[in-house]
Amino acid sequence: MSRPSTHASNTASGSLWMYIVGFVISIALTVGALWLVLARQFSTGTLLTVILLLAILQIGVQMFFFMHITDSPRPQFNLWILGLGMFFTFVVIAGSVWIMSFGAQGY
Amino acid sequence: MSTFLPHFPATFIVTGDPLIYGAEVSIVLATVGILFVLTYFKKWRWLWREWLTTVDHKKISVMYLIAALLMFFRGGVDAMLMRTQLIRPNMSFLQAEHYNQIFTTHGTIMILFMAMPFIFAMFNIAVPLQIGARDVAFPYLNAVSFWLFFFAALLFNLSFVVGGSPDAGWVSYPPLAGLEFDRGPGENFYLLSLQITGIGSIATGINFMATILKMRAPGMTLMRMPLFSWSVLASSILIIFAFPALTVALALLLIDRLAGAHFFTMFQGGNPMMYINLFWIWGHPEVYIVILPAFGIFSEVVSTFSGKRIFGYSSMVASLMTISVISYVLWVHHFFTMGAGPGVNSFFAVATMCVGIPTGVKVFNWLFTMYRGRIRLTVPMLWAIAFIPIFAIGGATGVMLAAAPADYQYHNSFFLIAHFHQVLIGGTVFGMLAGMYYWWPKMFGYMLNERLGRWAFWLFNSGFYVTFFPQYLLGLMGMTRRMYTYPANMGWNTLNFISTMGAYVMGIGFIVLVMDVVYSIRFGERDVTGDPWNGRTLEWSLPSPAPHYNFARIPTVTSRDAWWTSKQERSRSDAPRKLEPLQPIHMPKSSGRPFIMSAIFFIGGFGLVFNWYALGFLALLGVLVSMLLRSLEYDTDYYVPVEEIEQTEAALGRA
Amino acid sequence: MTIAHGEFPVHGRSINHDAPLEYSLEEGALRIFGFWLFLATDLVLFACLFATYVVLHGAAAGGPTEAQLFDVPGFTAETLILLTSSFTGGLGTYAMHNGSRRGLITWMIITVLLGLSFIGLEVKEFVTYATHGAPLQRSAFLSAFFTLVGTHGCHVSLGILWMLSIIYQLARRGITPITARKVFIVGLYWHFLDIVWVFIFTVVYLNGVMS
Ligand code: HEM
Ligand SMILES: [Cu+2]
């Protein structure tokens, strides 16, 4: 299988615009989150959800625009592993919070 | 004294117990003896060139195996001491404090310094050969892993004579293991040595995942891969995702102890239960990390010695992968009694019971593979067959423990002890011993003696039942774990006596095993064919032991059980095989740096045990410098010329 | 061969001219993959630290709380600096793919400088806390805070040292498949740390000033 050449500046890792767009989005996401918090647009719970969502978007931006995950040779086992890692990350954090929340929970 | 000199605790060298004096004397004698032998036979250079600097996975495997057997011995001695103390009520063979130390070192050594190196020995010998690779993906890193493990084990065992052993159990829960209740350096030994070996294990997990996913021979698709390699993949997935949790749990406890933080203390908002949570995020997957490779070995052994393809290959693969994911979400079953709400306990109870399903699938597949097979009862096969009933019972008692409300009864009783020894010995240890007998000729070029092997097997296996069945009953009768003695009127006397007798039989079994090894070194039958078992997978296509580059020509794989297929094809046609011309082989160079860097880790760890921060800092610097030097090194590999390959192959009798 | 690219490499120096430079040696591709695996383990390491922080962050034990401690301009500056350094690091990779050694080295030096100023700000923040009644030993919250943020800081510091070593190697050897692989890997590391920081920014700082 042949893959597109990336020596020239015409593919995912190549285009300067990709980097600039990525940078702008990443700053926008950050400033947006900060603004939402300082301006207290929503209730605390909603706010937390929204800023977490913005942070998750930020993962996508870094991965796609800067880390060139789409560049890696097929089959892309690294994406599988990364997905698994994110799932386990979620399990560890959500699980710990849930488990350690006893006392708050009547039984 | 000036503050520049490190502070030596009063108990720097442990004193006061005849057992320990004995150990100290024997350590000194053994060290002197080893140094003498090495010098007398002028073996220093050989040791350095052939072993300490090697990056060859086959040699690393041998070193792991030796280390695992030695640690098995040390852990086994601990076990014998404990069982001796419990043989009768009110024994005073061991004092309470000493008993605590022994059960702590026993558990820690058996899991981290016996089971782990044992599985790594098997990873290393079999995986590259089975998948048709010349080495692992990162041979240098592989050496780093081994030496980190080695020096961590050294550090841990040093605590026995220097400073004092840890005594807060292999799980080391705070606040008991916190500074308020445990000032001694023993606990630091535990934390630092586990930290160091943990780094090595993570590196091994990464290494084998990369090897398996990226270095298979042409044509060996994932679904043609031998099941042992699949099991290593599953185990590696768990390693890379579970070990960081251990790293964090240990690091935080260490920060509590060294820097006065309050993660797990009883003051300033600390929460000891968070340690328990983190520990088992690693701890539960860990038991699967050590059992999955055993499953893989059983699959290889059962299929080879039944002369049949494994039954239900795809379901075997699916169950391995399912187990590796599910077993990550079970950890709470180790602390149902902590008091998390009913929602939490129910979820984890149900999840725990679910893991029995894929495990059951595997058991049936092994049985169906044997069904109507031409079974050869070799020693590896004996261990594999004996595993099945033991593991079935262990699984069943596991499901009993997983019923959260009932676990309030079983938890921390001898019932639990019996459960996990059932799965760990019957599963992991039997599996590793099966693997050892199976791959021994591949590692060393000669077979282990079958007669002695059978003796060892029967002693160990029957001793096992005698030891652990009484413990289930004792647990149900209320005997809790980690008690150093018990009153005479509890009705536990007979069962404890029987259990200890069983333990002695197992001990004798182990001795016979060692005798087998020693006997076979001299008299073992040479394996001249490279395929002594009439095997099915690629490692048997090579001479025993394999040349350092493994495959003169990388094979092209067209089916599962690749070696079996090619043997069949060869027997069908007499046409001489067309061989591709040899090519120079690209190989990594040996390096002394893994050894040196790990030794620096050891020194730093030792310093931190005694709060000598300067030493710790220097060591950190040393490690950074080693890494830098590695990064600046470009001349890391070489080519084996064709003539040399030809000569080696000819000497091995291969065209 | 009909086999998909990259699936069955053999130990060796076979060169794939179609791939980007850092992937052009089989070994390079292998190491990059290995580094992804390392990042996955590092992810879980941070997950555990985050879990600890989330569980313990309310436990101020009568000491300073998050809302009292965190300083919005300070952590915003740290965040913007780190995000920018991720961008400049990316520009370095871009220059590398265009074969410009000067560009690559320049961007890497800028990245290092940004990294250093990030570390400088963080150290200043830590020292301020520690000398104003909020050291690590004060409460479980502070233990968790210093450890989580400090672990990230250690990673960044290591990244700086690592980049310096690679800059040196680039200056000596130029852009080769090997140095290109090294640049690419340290880049992955750097962007990864950026992601972790975004979560520190969100979960620790923003959530802290919210409460
Ligand atoms: C069907 C499979 C299994 C189930 C349902 C199961 C269930 C359990 C449960 C519920 C506990 C905690 C009991 C308590 O602390 O009160 C436990 C403990 C344990 N299990 Fe299993 N288990 C299974 C398989 C295994 C395997 C395969 C291994 C190891 C190879 C293993 C090793 C252990 C260990 C070491 C402990 C105790 C650790 C300690 O407290 O020191 N288990 N098991
Ligand atoms: Cu478990």
Image: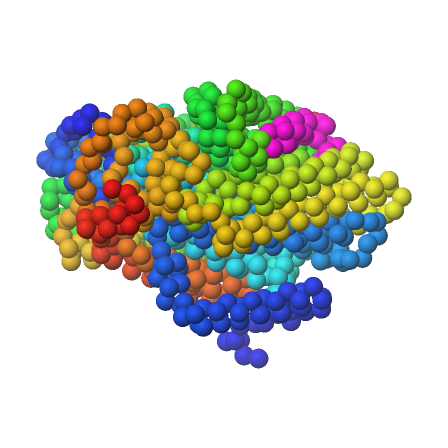
Residue drawn at point x = 37 percent, y = 29 percent? B564
Secondary structure predominantly adopted by residues drawn in magenta: helix
Residue at the outermost bottom position:
B1
Q: Position of residue C156 (x, y in %)?
A: 34, 50
Q: The C terminus of chain B is located in which quarter? A: top left
Residue at the outermost right position:
B489
Q: Does the magenta segment cover residue A52?
A: no
Q: The N terminus of chain B is located in which quarter? A: bottom right
Is residue B339 positioned above or below C144 on the image? above
Front residue of this view, candidates B439 and B24: B439
Say whether residue B392 is visible.
Answer: yes
Is residue B589 positioned above or below C34 on the image? below
Residue drawn at point x = 45 percent, y = 72 percent? B40
Q: Does the magenta segment cover residue B412?
A: yes
Q: Position of residue C128 (x, y in %)?
A: 44, 56
Q: Position of residue C164 (x, y in %)?
A: 25, 56
Residues shaded magenta? B386-415
